[in-house]
Amino acid sequence: MNSLLKLASAQRKSSLSANFVAFVGDRNSEDLMQRFAQEQNIAHAYVQTGGIDEAIEHVSKMQRSPAQLVVDVSAVAMPLSELARLAAVCEPSVQVIVVGAANDVGLFRNLLEIGVQDYLVKPLTIELLRRAIGSGRDAQPLRQSRTGKAIGFAGTRGGVGVTTVATHLAHHLANAGRRIALVDLNLHGGAANSMLGLKSNNGLIDVLRDADRLDQQFVERSLVARGNRLFVLSAELPYGEPLRVPDGALGEVLERLKPHFHYILLDIPGQGHALADAGIGEAQVLYLVADPSIHSAREVLRLTRHIDNREKPPSTSVILNSPNAATSGRLKTGDFVGAIHRQVLLELPFDGAALATAENLGEPAPPGKSRYRDAIAALADSLSGRPLAASSAWYARLLSKRST
């Protein structure tokens, strides 16, 4: 009995580390896929009967997504919508091959548009699999793969809660199944690590110094993991010790991260130095975190002018945070909006006790008990381009094409 349990455990562990995963809708296709995997000498392959639901359940348990994923949509009425559900558990770099029963050119084009590697029409044959999947392990996809988004957070002054926003959003997205990299650009020890209950390994220093000869393994070793889906890249240089960051180094690091994470969150420190400006330049979406004060309103205006003058400015939104209890001297929201001449995307409520306890414990504020945590969930919704109360989607909404 013990030997059988050990065998079952080993098989389960092997299935969760497979590089090639296939869920097909019938036994004939399963048998054919098994033969194909053996013929191609795919060392780590997992093939089962199933569809979208089974694929989601299996891949969500894997620490890393497989290099290739085959999924059968023959029995699915709305394949594009169902494939969107697969987004939350797949890294952007995964090559997704869809199998279906409909010989539909329109569907094929739509699938390519959302980043699918190929569409195979049943009945499957070994030769068809060999052309579409065998060569695909080394070939480029038919369309440019989509990659993760770089999301920047910058404050208008110290103490407005930039790191608190970034770490809570990272937690929320990771708990929703996304793979998240949080990059704390404060080289002398930002607060992201302590808020997440982690210690820095100075990985950010290593990758910035060697950006011209990075490889994926080097980058991954530089990340500190918090669970299976949230990773931090940070530094703790001694105070007074400078670091000259080569031009373009941050961009090189982010390009290595984007294929493997849905979002790279950039915690951008106070403005005025090269790395902060590089973070703004690399962000595709930028959130300016402000408090309801005249100084923050002035800084929003200065920062937006600086951002808008860039060759490729990020999409910029203002978040109004209340890091301290309300006082009579603070600006009203309407007055703040009038001062900055633009709308505020979201107001984050003061939730001092919950946030103070969370920071001391290295945990996020508890869900369902914190108005701040509820507001962060709304911010996560806004990233998808949907109304704040809607859920997120994958290919077409979560992941963007590379900037052109």
Image (cartoon, helix red, strand yellow):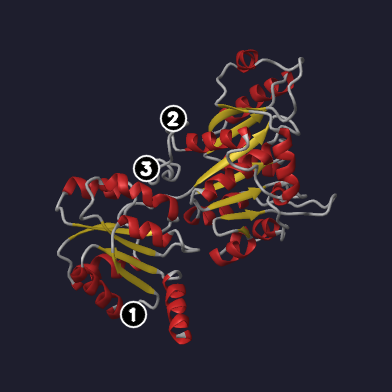
Label 2 packing within 10 angstroms: few (<14), some (14-19), many (20+): few
Residue where numbered disc 2 is placed: 387
Q: Quadrant of the N terminus?
A: bottom left
Residue extending farthest right: 240
Q: Amino acid at mark 3?
A: Ala
Residue 307 appears in which quarter of the rendering? top right
Residue extending farthest front: 1
Residue 43 appears in which quarter of the rendering? bottom left
Q: Amino acid at mark 2?
A: Pro
Instruction: Please provide percent x and percent y for residue 121.
Output: 17, 59
Nearer the observer, 318 or 390: 390
238 on left or right of 35: right
Q: Are marks 2 and 1 in contact (CB under 8 Å)?
A: no
Nearer the observer, 196 or 157: 196
Q: Compare marks 2 and 3 and give the one earlier in the sequence.
A: 2
Q: CA distance from mark 2 to mark 1?
A: 47 Å
Q: What residue is rendered at 46% in x and 79% in y?
A: 10
Q: Can you say whether 21 is above or below 380 in the image?
A: below
Q: Can you say whether 309 is above or below 223 in the image?
A: above
322 on left or right of 130: right
Residue where numbered disc 1 is placed: 41
Q: Compare marks 3 and 1 and give the one earlier in the sequence.
A: 1
346 on left or right of 125: right
Q: Amino acid at mark 1?
A: Asn
Element class at badge 3: loop
Residue where numbered disc 3 is placed: 396
